[in-house]
Structure formats: C-alpha cells, structure tokens
Amino acid sequence: MKTLSAVTLALVVGAVGGMTNGATAAPITYDFTGPTSGTNVDLGQSHTYTAAGGPGITGEAGTYSGSSPANNSAFNTASGVHLVGNNRGSDEQGVGVCGTTSGSCSGGHLTGDDGEIDRDGKEVVRLDITNLLATYGNFQINADSATDGELLGVFTSNSATSLGTKIADITSAQNNVGITPTGDFLYFVSDSDWGGANVLLHSLTVTPDAVPEPASLALLATALFGAGFLRRQQRPVLVR
C-alpha cells in the first residue's frame, strides 16, 4: 500500500506541475494611437477600442475634482471634454483629452496641452475594463505612457465616479509597466511634479495566464481517482 500511495502522490504532483506548463495565450494589445497620421482627432466623449483576440474596451473623457495631483478624487464626465487621438510623432501617440467648443474639439483645443492628459486641467482618461475581467479570470496587464520623463498616474476602482486607489506611475522610458486592476475601471491622469505636463496613454497589453493542457487535466483526474481508491481500500474492516 505504501508503494501505491507514493505512486499516487507522484501522479498528483506531476499533474499539478504539468498544469503550470500549459499553453500561454498570445498577448492582446490595445493601441490608443490616433487614427490619422500626423495630426490629432476628436474622438468624442467616449470611444470603443478593439484588439485582435480581445473584447472591446470603452474609453471615457473627464476631469477629476479635488487637489492636484489626484488622490482618490471624484471623476466627472460632464466637464466639456472629449477624448483626442494623438498621432503627431514618435513621442506623441496615444489618447488624451481636449476641451470642447460648441460641442467639439478643434484648432488649438486639439494641440499642445489641450490634446494631452494635463495635470493643470485635471483631465482624466477612464477605461472600462469590465469585459476584460469577464473574459479572463486571470491575466497580467501592462500600460505604456508615450511622453518621456513625465508621470502618468494609474488608478483602479469599481466606481465609475471615483478614481480609487493608485497602482502605478509610468513613463515611456519604462516601456510597459505591470499593473494589477482591482476594479472594473482604470483611470489615467497626469502625475508630474509640474503643471502643463504632456502625458498620453499609448497602449495597454493584456496577457492571459497559462491555460492547463488537456493531457495535464486528464493526468490530474487519474491521480485523484487513484487517491480516492486507495482511501477506500485502507478503510478499517468492522468486525461484527
């Protein structure tokens, strides 16, 4: 019996080990670069972003209330701002926020600080990642800022009206920075130490966790069945 128990234990350990070596799904990258090369484009109050292999996620333009830099501040969408897709150059590609005039962004409102996530104006880009959380129970997520040397603050929350908890400060020099959302929404703000900071959200990369291989699952089931069989065999016999 001891030999069989050892064999069963080895099967269980081997099956669990095999599950960790399962196939890893390909990374899914959401690119927030503006649609038109060499310019900025007004995307409206909200905009849906898609990526091959992943669900759509919705961006929303707004501002935050309270002191600057942001710290668990309220998020306001009724603020006369739109999302703006930047595509002006290598360090100015991504999504920012512009002020609206007559219901749209134009001229100077699309360029300079008005086309970025600017701490002075307290602009915010909110991403609704509910579909990501529903599609992938476990995943790694990386964010990328497109402007050198200036901090892009990242907050996470289950509330559509509150920035919640800060989870990262990122710059383009860091390339992709791993973040762990704890809610359905991600908020991106300027967190630089000076006013007028020009920061953008460039990309978001999602890497689903490894999926157990079918063979590993079958091996685990066999091992667990063997363990249950041994337990039945080792039960004491009642003498009447």
Image (cartoon, helix red, strand yellow):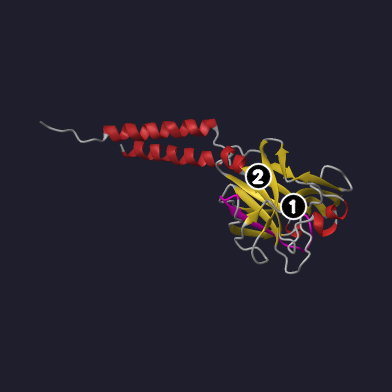
**The residue under label 1 is which amino acid type?**
Gly
Question: Pointer 1: what residue?
Answer: 80
Q: Residue furthest bottom?
A: 193
Q: Quick check: 138 above or below 123?
A: above
Which label is found at residue 1? none
Q: Residues within 10 Å of mark 2 (few under 14, many from 20)?
A: many
The residue located at (81%, 54%) in the rendering is: 115
Nearest to the eye among marks 1 and 2: give it. 1
Percent x, y for residue 18?
A: 52, 39
Which of the pair 218/73 is nearer the observer? 73
Q: What is the secondary structure assignment of the residue under circle 2?
A: strand
Q: Which contiguous range is marked in magenta?
A: 146-160
The residue located at (60%, 42%) in the rendering is: 130
Percent x, y for residue 40?
A: 85, 48
Q: Residue 30, located in which quarter of the rendered image?
A: top right
Q: What is the secondary structure assignment of the residue under circle 1?
A: loop
**The residue under label 2 is which amino acid type?**
Val
The residue located at (67%, 65%) in the rendering is: 69
Percent x, y for residue 4?
A: 35, 36
Question: Pointer 2: what residue?
Answer: 206
Q: Is 206 colored magenta in this rendering? A: no
Q: Residue 174, located in which quarter of the rendered image?
A: bottom right
Which of the pair 96/120 is nearer the observer? 120
Percent x, y for residue 5?
A: 35, 38
